[in-house]
C-alpha cells in the first residue's frame, strides 16, 4: 500500500481566531494519524481545490477553524470558508467518501484559554474515528 502524500489530518486555523497566549502544537500524532496545523491569515483564504487535493493525497480529513458568525476581522472570510467546506463535503459525497471528512469549527479570541485546543482536538478525534480514506486504502496515492 502506498504512503500518503501529506499528513493524515490537516488543520487550518485563522490567525484572528487564536486567543491571546494560546499555544497549539504545529503537529502531533493522534491514533496513529499525523496531524499538521497551519496558521492562515483568514479562514476565507482556503480554496476548495487545495482542500480536495489534501484529501486526494490520502488524508483522513481536513479541519478549518474560523471566526464566529458576524465576527470575521476581514468582512466575510468565515462565510466564504464555510461555503467552501460545504462544497468539499458535497464533492466528497459525490465521489463516495464521507462528507464528514471536511469539518468547519468556530473559535473567537475571546474564548476561554484552552478552548481552541479543545475544539481542534475534538475535530481531529472525529476525523480519526473515520479511519483511513478509501482513496488511500486502495492505493491510489
Image: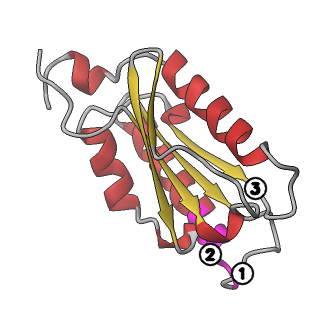
Q: Which residue is mark 3?
A: 107
Quadrant occupied by the N terminus? top left
Give me the residue at 46% from left, 65% from top: 46
Q: Which residue is mark 1?
A: 73
The answer to whether residue 80 is above or below residue 9 is below
The answer to whether residue 58 is above or below residue 26 is above
Q: Is residue 80 magenta?
A: yes
For marks 2 and 1, give the CA distance.
8 Å
Q: Which residue is mark 2?
A: 77
For the residue labelled by badge 1, is the local secondary structure a helix, a strand or a loop?
loop
- The magenta-colored residue range is 75-81
Q: Nearer the viewer, residue 100 or 91?
A: 100
Q: Is residue 61 left or right of residue 140?
A: right
Give me the residue at 57% from left, 57% from top: 13
Q: Is residue 114 left or right of residue 136?
A: right
Q: Position of residue 107 (x, y in %)?
A: 76, 55
Q: Are marks 2 and 1 in contact (CB under 8 Å)?
A: yes
The answer to whether residue 138 is above or below residue 51 is above
Q: Is residue 126 left or right of residue 46?
A: right
For the residue labelled by badge 2, is the local secondary structure a helix, a strand or a loop?
helix
For marks 1 and 3, give the CA distance.
13 Å
Q: Position of residue 51 (x, y in %)?
A: 38, 53
* Front of the two marks 3 and 2: 3
Number of residues whose C-alpha sits closer than 10 Å to that of mark 3, classed few (under 14), some (14–19) or many (20 or more): many
Quadrant occupied by the C terminus? top left
- Dividing the picture into quadrants, the one containing residue 123 is top right
Amino acid at each position: 500500500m502506498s504512503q500518503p502524500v501529506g499528513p493524515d489530518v490537516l488543520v487550518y486555523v485563522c490567525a484572528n481566531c487564536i486567543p491571546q497566549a494560546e499555544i497549539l502544537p504545529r503537529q502531533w500524532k493522534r491514533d496513529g494519524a499525523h496531524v499538521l496545523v497551519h496558521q492562515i491569515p483568514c479562514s476565507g483564504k482556503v480554496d476548495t481545490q487545495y482542500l480536495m487535493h489534501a484529501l486526494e493525497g490520502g488524508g483522513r480529513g481536513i479541519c478549518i477553524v474560523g471566526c464566529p458568525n458576524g465576527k470575521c476581522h476581514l468582512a466575510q472570510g468565515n462565510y466564504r470558508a464555510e461555503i467552501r467546506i460545504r462544497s468539499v463535503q458535497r464533492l466528497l459525497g459525490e465521489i463516495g467518501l464521507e462528507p464528514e471528512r471536511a469539518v468547519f469549527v468556530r473559535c473567537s479570541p475571546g474564548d476561554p484559554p484552552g478552548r481552541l485546543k479543545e475544539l481542534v482536538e475534538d475535530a481531529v478525534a472525529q476525523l480519526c474515528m473515520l479511519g483511513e480514506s478509501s482513496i488511500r486504502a486502495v492505493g491510489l496515492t
